Amino acid sequence: MDDTPLPADDTAAGEALMPGLDLPQTAPDPGYQVLARKYRPSKFEDLIGQDAMVRTLTNAFAAGRIAHAYMLTGVRGIGKTTTARLIARALNYETDTADGPAMTLSEPGRHCDAIARSAHVDVMEMDAASRTGVNDIREILDGVRYAPVSARYKVYIIDEVHMLSTSAFNALLKTLEEPPEHAKFIFATTEIRKVPVTVLSRCQRFDLKRIDREVLTDHLTRICGLENASVDREGLSLIARAAEGSVRDALSLLDQAIVQGSEETGPVTAPQVRDMLGLADRARVLDLLEQALSGKTADALDEIGALYDAGGDPVVITRDLLDYVHAISRVKAAGPGADLGEAADTVQRIAGLAEKQSLAQLTRLWKILLTGLDDVRNAPDALAAAEMTVLRLAAAASLPPPEEAARILAGHPPAARSEASAPSASPAGEAPGKPEPASQAPAHAARTAAPVAPAEAESELPGPRTFEALIALLREKRDIALQSDVERYVRPGAFRPGSFTFQPVEDCPPDLAQRLAKRLQEWTGARWAILADHEVRGGETWAERRQREAEEKLERARQDPAVAEALRLFPGAEIVAVREAPAADGDADEKTTERRA
């Protein structure tokens, strides 16, 4: 045993030691301390983003209205345990000049250091995730009745309290309802809904908010200054976004980001942070969304493949698409002034997309992406699931808006198209200065006030006006594959210029409506609302119609007296085909009939 005498200034400390124990000459080097622990708040002023809670507690302490139990809830890494320890310090705050609960902890109190290190005998911390049973709670309840050893209050901090069993909660209820004056309880949970209402009703509840991205970015900037680290603010913003409001997660990521740079390479850049996080470039994700919504499926698939090759996680890419659809919806609902927290050029692109979509369409896109996110998370091939989600987006974008589809099914012309073509100062669908038909009301009354009749609005739309005209257009354009599908699988329903509803035949290609709408838009320059609806009772397909007409011609030929006589004279003969004869002078109905013996 080393008998080296203690230094003079450590005599008192040495006397307090048990015989045979030596006091180290110097404290051991604790090594590097991660930022999440190094910059853990030591006073309430250090808490960021929780002003409402701090204000409430400050007023309560000042008025002497201190609750006996607190419930802290929020996402992981938001500061629940840290706040619980700060409250425990505030309850037991004691200095040479202060002897009572206080929220101002700028001067360390007698109990502050031990409480912060979870080493105080009167402040007990319990992790309910590992100690869930009723026996664990009984250990606490057995000690509640005894007065604190040195502090003002006995404080029980129970983390992840929602993990307690039902019997453990029941054992806790009576003590929570009538606790001793010297006992305080502080609970923390990430799953507030799993805590029984009977427990919640006996606690003062504080919901710790997620930290706003800009506030968290400013916090990371301050820490970089204290650490003499240089990280681009854009990179810090990426970290704050990835942390999803969690301070601990943000500091852990910052720890990782700082070492991406060095004195030789210079500051850590946003691309380096993006590579570290495995996040896709959000600007490129916006490109991907624009391509999908405009029907450029090949470009969209190339883009998502490039993002994946660059290190983008398919889950994160899909979540970014969700974020953008949400942002577009906010702009659509609240106008271009909606607070999106994005760069100015990004806001401009989002506003442009919002102009092209209705709220109902955006709701449909959101639902597709929400379902797709689950698919991407659970699929054996995440990239394939993400690609299929993008293809579903593209297919949905080519469909008419739900409200327009409802109008088509009701037999009305699409409202959006006529409104889009009308000047703001004129009635919907009316061309300024267009002369009125003579059958209408006098011009001095009709031109300024009367809405345009649906027939007039439809007459201005280019393209076929009947199903027969559509077939003729397909033949003229020589799109053989599309023509064949339309003739075989389409039972025509309501047909108006600009809109067409049909009943698809069994085995109809699922993308037939989208293909037809795309071609009609290319050929006519107008957007067509094509809707395939299994509930519609459509007419004959074109193929069925041709077959029926051929059979009717054969039947008419059989009824012809001359043909009937020929069939009688030549037993076993049958009619093979009926062809229209060239029109003679005054006789357009003459036919020739082929016979086969």
Image (spheres, helix red, strand yellow):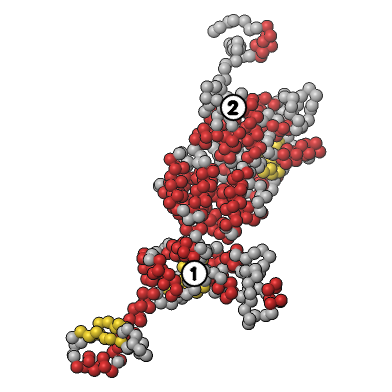
Q: Is residue 463 above or below residue 557?
A: above
- Relative to 68, is 478 on the left or the right? left
State which tag comes first along the sequence, 1 or 2.
Answer: 2
The mark tally for this picture is 2
Name the quarter where the N terminus is drawn. Answer: top right
Q: Position of residue 243 (x, y in %)?
A: 57, 38
> Residue at left 26%, top 91%?
563
Q: Is residue 388 above or below residue 263?
A: below
Q: Is residue 178 visible?
A: yes
Give neighbour class at mark 1: few <14, some 14-19, many 20+ (Cα, 10 Å): many
- Which residue is most to the front? 585
Give neighbour class at mark 2: few <14, some 14-19, many 20+ (Cα, 10 Å): some
Name the quarter where the C terminus is drawn. Answer: bottom left
> Residue at left 68%, top 73%?
447
Label 2 SS: loop
Q: Amino acid at mark 1?
A: Gly
Image quarter for residue 96?
Answer: top right
Mark linked to residue 230: 2
* Residue carrying label 1: 463
The alpha-carbon separation of the residues under discs 1 and 2 comes to 62 Å
- Relative to 63, is 431 on the left or the right? left
- Which residue is most to the top? 4
- Relative to 11, is 230 on the left or the right? left
Q: Position of residue 508 (x, y in %)?
A: 39, 67
- Of residues 157 and 496, the one nearer the viewer is 496
